[in-house]
Image (tube, rainbow, N blue to C red):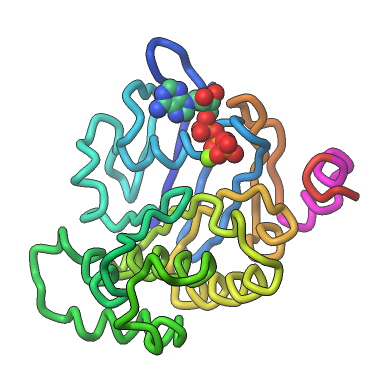
C-alpha cells in the first residue's frame, strides 16, 4: 500500500483551498496531518475520497491515479474514510451501523468474521450491539464510525478529527484503539487538531497552514519544533 499525493491543488467554486500539497503514506504507517481550523485538512481527505469538485495534481494509490475517479469507486480500492462529525445512523443499532459499512461490498460472505474483528477491537460495541447508535456517548459513536469503516477491511484508513469533542479519558481509549488498528497492518492518515494525541500515535507528520504544507518530519522532530510546540502543543 502506498498513497502518494503530488502537487495537489483542490478547491470549490473556482477557488483553491489546497495549494501544491505533496505527501506520502507508506505501508503500515500512521501519518498525521496537523493544522488549525480551515487549513484544508478535511478537504485533503475529501480529495482522496473523490469528494472535492476541483482537483489537479496527482493522487496515486498503489499505482492507480485517483483523480477523476467517482467517489463510490474509492472504497473498493481499499480506502475507508471516517468523516468529521462521525455521522453514525442514530436510529439504527450498533450492529446495523457496522453492517452498513459493508453495504457496498459485492460479496456478502464473511460479514460475521468482519463484525467479530470489530468487536474484538472495540469490546464496548459488542456489549452495546443492540443499542441505537444515537443513544451512545460521543466516544462510543466514534468507535461505531471507525468500526463501520473497518468493515471494508481497508488498506488505508482516513480519519478526520476522531478526538473532536471527546473527554480526555475517552481520548486515551481512542489512542489505544488507533494503536491496535495500526498494529493490524492498516495504514492510517490521521487528521487532528489534538497534536498531542496525533504525535503520540503517528510516526511522521505534516503541518498544513492555509492550504499549504509548511512543515514535515518525524513525530519526534515535530514535537521538538518551536512552531509546533507554540501553535499546536500549547507549550
Ligand atoms: N463544500 C465546500 N464549499 C466551499 N468551500 C468549502 C467547502 N468545504 C470547505 N470549504 C472551504 O475550504 C477551506 C478549508 O476547509 P476544510 O474544511 O478543508 O478545513 P479544515 O482544516 O478541515 O478545518 P476544520 O478544522 O474546521 O475542520 C475553508 O475555507 C472552507 O470554508
Ligand atoms: Mg475539517
Image vertical order of residue 171 relative to residue 81, above or below: below
Q: Residue at x 47, y 48 (%)?
A: 84
Q: Residue at x 8, y 63 (%)?
A: 106
Give the dominant element type of the magenta stretch: helix, strand or loop. Answer: helix
Image vertical order of residue 25 relative to residue 95, above or below: above
Image vertical order of residue 106 relative to residue 124, above or below: above
The percent position of residue 108, horizontal first and vertical second, equals 10, 73
Magenta residue span: 219-230
On whether residue 229 falls in the magenta region, the answer is yes
- Classify the position of the N terminus by image quarter: bottom left
Q: Residue 226 falls in which quadrant of the image?
A: top right
The percent position of residue 144, horizontal first and vertical second, equals 40, 69
Q: Residue 70 falls in which quadrant of the image?
A: top left
The percent position of residue 82, horizontal first and vertical second, equals 41, 55
Please tell me how many numbered marks the rendered image carries.
Answer: 0
Answer left or right for 6 relative to 133: right
Answer left or right for 14 relative to 74: right
Q: Is residue 94 visible?
A: yes
Answer left or right for 149 relative to 41: left
Q: Residue at x 86, y 51 (%)?
A: 224
Q: Residue 77 falls in which quadrant of the image?
A: bottom left
On whether residue 134 falls in the magenta region, the answer is no
Amino acid at each position: 500500500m502506498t498513497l502518494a499525493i503530488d502537487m495537489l491543488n483542490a478547491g470549490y467554486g473556482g477557488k483553491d483551498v489546497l495549494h501544491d500539497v505533496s505527501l506520502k503514506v507508506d505501508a503500515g504507517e500512521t501519518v498525521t496531518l496537523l493544522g488549525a481550523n480551515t487549513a484544508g485538512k478535511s478537504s485533503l481527505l475529501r480529495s482522496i475520497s473523490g469528494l472535492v469538485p476541483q482537483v489537479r495534481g496527482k493522487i496515486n494509490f498503489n499505482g492507480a491515479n485517483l483523480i477523476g475517479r467517482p467517489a463510490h469507486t474509492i472504497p473498493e480500492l481499499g480506502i475507508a474514510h471516517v468523516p468529521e462529525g462521525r455521522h453514525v445512523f442514530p436510529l439504527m443499532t450498533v450492529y446495523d451501523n457496522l453492517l452498513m459499512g459493508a453495504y457496498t461490498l459485492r460479496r456478502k460472505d464473511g460479514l460475521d468474521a468482519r463484525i467479530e474483528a470489530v468487536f474484538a477491537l472495540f469490546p464496548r460495541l459488542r456489549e452495546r450491539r443492540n443499542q441505537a447508535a444515537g443513544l451512545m456517548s460521543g466516544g462510543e459513536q466514534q468507535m461505531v464510525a471507525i468500526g463501520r469503516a473497518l468493515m471494508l477491511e481497508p488498506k488505508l484508513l482516513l480519519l478526520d478529527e476522531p478526538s473532536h469533542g471527546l473527554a480526555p479519558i475517552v481520548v486515551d481509549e481512542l489512542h489505544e484503539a488507533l494503536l491496535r488498528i495500526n498494529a493490524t497492518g492498516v495504514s492510517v492518515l490521521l487528521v487532528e487538531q489534538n497534536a498531542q494525541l496525533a504525535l503520540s500515535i503517528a510516526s511522521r507528520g505534516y503541518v498544513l497552514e492555509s492550504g499549504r504544507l509548511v512543515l514535515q518530519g518525524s513525530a519526534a522532530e515535530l514535537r521538538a519544533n518551536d512552531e509546533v510546540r507554540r501553535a499546536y502543543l500549547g507549550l
